[in-house]
Every structure is written in C-alpha cells, then in structure tokens.
Image: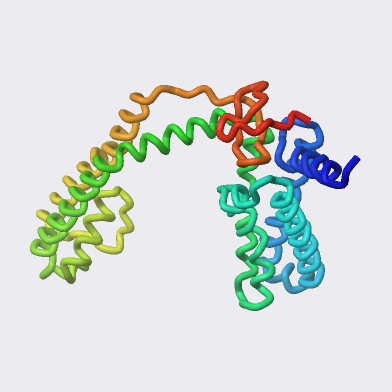
Amino acid sequence: MSIKYKLKNWKEKVHEVIYEADTPAGKLFDVILLLVILLSILLVMLESIESIGTKYAYILNVAEWVITILFSIEYIARIISVEKPKTYVFSFYGIIDLLSTIPKYISLFVLGTHSLVALRALRLLRVFRILKLTRFIGESANFGKALKRSRAKIAVFISFVIVLCIILGTVMYLVESNEGSGFTSIPRSVYWAIVTLTTVGYGDIAPITALGQFIASLIMILGYGIIAIPTGIVTSEMSKSEKELIPNNTQNCANCNEDYHQDNAEFCHKCGNKINHG
C-alpha cells in the first residue's frame, strides 16, 4: 500500500469525522464541538463579571487558551482534509471558524479584544446540521430570495418614509419650536418624527400644543400601517416562489465543500466528485 494511498485514506477519514454529521463519529465530533463552544462562551461571560474575573483570572485564561488551541487544530484539520482548501476557507462556516479562533491571538498584541471570542457563538449555527434542521435553512434561503426580489419596492418605500419624516419633522418644528417642548431644530424634529412613526416613542421630546399633539396622534396611527407594508411586500414575494425540498442529510463534498446533497447521492451535484459515504 503506497504512502499516497494511505494519506488519501487518512484525509477521507478525517473529512468524514469533521464534516459529516450523518455518521456516528461525525455526530459525536459535532456535539462535542458545540459543547466546547458553549463552554468557551460561558468562560467569556464569567470573565466579564469583575469578582469572578479577578479571582479566577489565571484559570480562565488557561482554559481559554486550551480551547483556542483545540479550535486552531480543528481549523487546520478542516483545511487539510479537503481537496480545495480555498472552498472551505472562504465559505460561510470557514470565515466564522476563523473569526472565532483569532481573537485570542489578537489579544496578545491588542488590548481589549479578548471579549471578541464571544464570536464563537456563531459556530452554534452548526446545530442545524447535527439536528437535521435543514428545512429551516431552506426556509431562510427562500426568505433571502424574497428579500432580494423585494429590494426595489422596499427601497422606494424607505425613500417615501424618509421624505415623509422630513416633512412631518418640519411641520412639527413650525408648530412647536417656540413652545419650549424640545423641537429646537428641524433635524431634531425629524428625529422625533422617525421615533414616533416607528412607534418606538422614547419620550425625550413631546409636543405640548393641541395642534402638535393632534399631529402626533395622526403620526402614531399612521405608523402602525407603515410598519406592516414591508412585511406585506416580502410575504407577497415569498408566496410566489415554490418551496424547494431540502434533502435531510449532511453529505459534504471533499472537493468543493458543497453541502446538502440528495439522499443516497453517489456524486456531488455541483462538481461531480464522488461523495464519501463512510
């Protein structure tokens, strides 16, 4: 048996464990990974508590370094176990994995960046693969497509709202500027119009004249109708698109890093590479 064959076989086994969530070994690896991520986030949260962070600073720091080194090893293993490392490095999960690993190293040179390790929470998105929640990923993709198709309508709508807020803010400035109610300038009045139209209502500025309060009441009522418009636009686009069936497996192509192939697929639907079924 040649060294080249042994190396290829080893890479396939590593790929199966790290990337596949259908096999027992792959599922165990991902579950342990999620537990370690949760532990890491917990450590960062505890460190932010002054009494705990001061008393157990050394222990927390050592634990964080251990976890960071483990994540570094895992990141390297993910790179070397695929045929085209760039497909993983520049993929969604690849970028997240890198962002969750480097903050601890950066903290050695830049103070105050240690808390960025909380970015590891993003890695919990892998739970979708482990628990077979791929249909939710499909729904989110469908929602994304609907947003993209709605962007022109939403842009027009937002432009209209901006113009409306400028007009309403200017009107309120003319009505309330001499009453000492906080409408000291048009920009400040536009800010109030935005806060009121979106029904946030901070209350830091409020009209005191009868006319101003009447206009404010109309803006509040108008706000409820305006908030519903973007939802209606996106919902309409979503209803037009057909629902796609998302396969309930996590087979990963070692060549192009493509996920979610058809059940029992032998070859990758994207590059044609043979899929390892363990």
Can you give x and y, in whole percent of width and height, for residue 44 in the image?
A: 68, 62
| Residue 223 in the image, given as x and y percentages of width and height | 24, 44
Quadrant the C terminus occupies: top right
- Quadrant of residue 24 in the image? top right
- Which one is in front, 129 or 164? 129
Kindly identify the residue that appears in the image at 51 percent across and 31 percent down. Answer: 138
Q: Position of residue 61 (x, y in %)?
A: 76, 69
> Which of 94/162 is in front?
94
Q: What is the tally of numbered marks visible in this picture?
A: 0
Picture residue at 60% right of the left edge, 28% below the top: 261
| Left/right of residue 156 with respect to residue 138 in the rendered view | left
Whether residue 273 is visible to the viewer of this picture, yes or no, is yes
From the viewer's perspective, is 123 left or right of 73?
left
Quadrant location of the N terminus? top right
Q: Is residue 177 above or below residue 236?
A: below
Which residue appears farthest toward the front when viewing the image?
2
In the foreground, 205 or 38: 38
Q: Residue furthest right?
A: 1
